[in-house]
Amino acid sequence: MKKALTLLAAGAVLTVAASAQAAPAPAPLVLNTNVISNIKKSTGVLDFTQFNATNGTLLSVQIELFSDLDSKFSVENKGKSATTFTLDSASSVSLSSSVFSLATLVNNYHSTVSKGAFDLTDDYAGTSGTVVTLAPQHQSVSAVFTDAATLAAFTGTGSVAATVTGLGTTKITASGNVHTAATSAYSAYGTVTYTFAAPVPEPETYAMLLAGLGLVGFAARRRKSA
């Protein structure tokens, strides 16, 4: 009986260990940063939430930076013949910290619009004018880090601060007598994706299992003796 209980306990420990090894890898943890709504010609800070080590062992860190470019172009041809307007808008957003840096994120828009001779009303409408409002031009850039220094920096219960810098231009070009106006804005935000391994049960867990099985065996022997 004692030998059987010993074998049972050993088998249970091996089963738990095998189950821990065979368990599927946890799904990556994706966390969003704050959003800087207009980083045009200025700087800001994005905060990347750190990985809590109680979730397991950190294997890789993926940083992704996003930017949406919004532009609006108003044109009016005030000349006596048709003309073509060239619309250009561009932004560049860079992200860096003492821990990591990403390639500069570039977002460009280029288009043309042709309008007829002046219709005698300077209103950015009619046959000689128009307003072009763009849907947000979405771009992103990312990088994956697996080095020990970066993994250590992103492990904790706080956040990693990264500086964002934005630069850009918006312009309208055309020949002749024209009236134009152009505006743009671009945002900055990011995500951090953590790939990690699930925590491995501590030796104390197996000791508690053995103790529990021992109590079960002791109770069984007492019942048999009775």
Image (cartoon, rainbow, N blue to C red):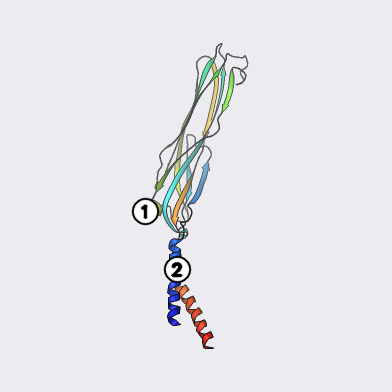
Kindly report the distance in space between the C-alpha atoms of the residues bearing marks 1 and 2.
32 Å
Instruction: Kindly give the residue lying farthest to the top in the view shown.
Output: 80
Name the spot of residue 94 as percent of width and height, x first: 43, 39
The one of 142 and 80 positioned closer to us in this rendering: 142
The residue under label 2 is 15
Q: Secondary structure at mark 1?
A: helix
Residue found at x 50% / y 84%: 221
How many residues crowd around disc 1 within 10 Å: few (fewer than 14), some, or many (20 or more)? few
Q: Is residue 17 visible?
A: yes
Counting every numbered tag in the picture gives 2
**As displayed, is residue 91 above or below residue 116?**
below
Name the spot of residue 132 as percent of width and height, x first: 57, 26
Residue found at x 49% / y 80%: 217
Name the spot of residue 223 as percent of width and height, x first: 54, 85
Instruction: Kindly give the residue lying farthest to the bottom in the view shown.
Output: 226
The residue under label 1 is 148
* Quarter in which the C terminus is drawn: bottom right
Q: Amino acid at mark 1?
A: Ala
